[in-house]
Amino acid sequence: MNSSGRAKDVWKRAKTYRNDTAKFLSDMVKIKSYSGQEEEICMHIASLCKDLDFDEVRIDGLGSVLARIGGGSKILAIDAHIDTVEVGDLSQWERSPFSGDIENGLVYGRGSSDQKGGAAAMLSAGRILRNLNYEGEWTIWFSFTVMEEDCDGMCWKYLIEEENLVPDFILSTEPTSCRLTRGHRGRMEIELNLRGVSAHGSAPERGDSAAYKAARAALAMEELNRELRPDREGFLGKGTIVVSQVDVRGPSQCAVPDVARLYMDRRLTWGENADLAIAQVREKVGRALGVDSVDCLMPDYVKTGWKGTRYSQELYFPTWKTDEMHPLVQAGIRTYRGLFAKAPVVNKWTFSTNLVSVSGRHGIPGIGFGPGDEKEAHASNEVNRIEDLVVCSAFYSNLVYELAGVEAGR
């Protein structure tokens, strides 16, 4: 079958499975799966993959579900995280966050876009490839990963460094509104600790307030944010820094506070890294406070997953991008054009994904293509479009064929 005929066949099958794909998503939304508490949904997805006759289904040591189609010498990973953030203020939801309702061409509920929609489309893509008896040069690992919302990319750090699953290429199914993405800013978390001298509140001149130091430091970060500049290419945009938490303490409510802690979210554009970002904070705060040294550090994240495995990493998530002329990006463009007879929009994500690890930390070429909109992520009344699920299940299936003959490499 030629490329055009195959794309038509894939698209026909994706539309045939439309209702099943929507139900896959609906059923997953009904299963609460906060980070570190994903056991039920992992068992559910593993059972579905077995029912759909994937070639191999297993669960890694951290708790992610891995389902394989094909046995070629090159590896393509297609990834969705299946944990979600919590629901927040229930009064802001118009229906139950875990309803999984299917109405008006939409699937409703927490995780429908971020990011179980991608997982549902992956299940149908695997089904399509299995029914087409795919036996090409690629092994496709569908990864349904855990703990992303708490520490994006740590699940893939575990897969690559502990399980030795090292793909040649990766596709993230985070929401892109069915656009092709090829990069996003990195990020890191920064902790700043300040000390003052306590004194009785009736005589503040006897002390040295950590609160006022914290205020000056916060204003210095506001200034630093204004000074940060976009990347040279103008693709990823400017880096940012924001003070996300301030904690000031003293011996009592009637005392000059002697301890302050500022926590910061730093987004990193191309060319920025952790060393640069920490140096900028130290320089700015040091100047604002008139001191030579500042206690500024990058914290570690440590958590035990649902399988009982304790794992950690520093809270640094490197920037990544894949050149538009890279064979993987070009295969994505061909895939979309073959299915829909037009070129895709090629863009970037605003938020962060598991590709901070696979592509940012480990240098493996990646792209993104997913159902739903970024704005739905972490929002009340989250929804996803069923049509997006169909488009994405076809895209993932057809991409595998468009990668035929593409050399794996960075």
Image (cartoon, grey):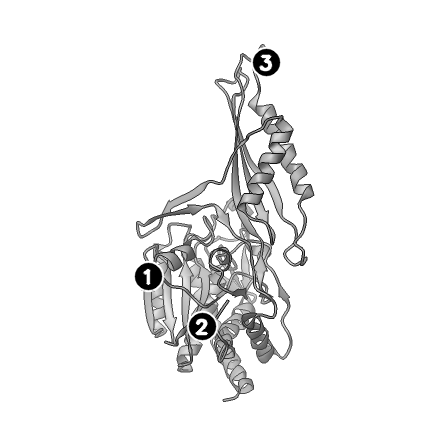
Q: Residue at x 37, y 68 (%)?
A: 67
> Against 165, is 260 above or below?
above
Between disc 1 and disc 2, whose residue precedes? Answer: 1
Image coordinates of residue 282 in percent, x first then y, are 58, 35
Few, some or many residues within 10 Å of mark 1 (<14, 14–19, 20+): some
Residue bearing the label numbered 3:
204
Q: Write the residue at 56% across / 15% down.
A: 207
Q: Judge by depth and name the residue closer to the eye, 154 or 67.
A: 154
Q: Amino acid at mark 3?
A: Pro
Residue at position x 34%, y 65% from top? 46
**Where residue 307 appears, x then y in whole percent?**
31, 52
- Residue 145 in the image: above or below residue 128: above
**Kind of residue sitting beneath label 1:** Ile
Q: Is residue 14 visible?
A: yes
Give the mark nearer the N terminus: 3 vs 2: 2
Find the distance from the CA under tag 1 to the CA under tag 2.
20 Å
Q: Secondary structure at mark 1?
A: strand
Which residue is under mark 1? 59
Q: State yes or no: discs 1 and 3 in contact (Cβ < 8 Å).
A: no
Name the N-terminal-most of marks 1 and 3.
1
- Residue 124 - label: 2
Left-right relation of 300 to 201:
left
Residue at the farthest front position: 292
Q: CA distance from mark 3 to mark 2?
A: 66 Å
Rendered view: 86 above or below 358:
above
Instruction: Name the side, left or right, on which 217 lies relative to 166.
Output: right
Q: How many angstroms separate mark 1 from mark 3 (CA)?
A: 59 Å
Say which mark, if any, is on residue 20.
Answer: none
Residue 82: percent from the left, percent from the top?
43, 58
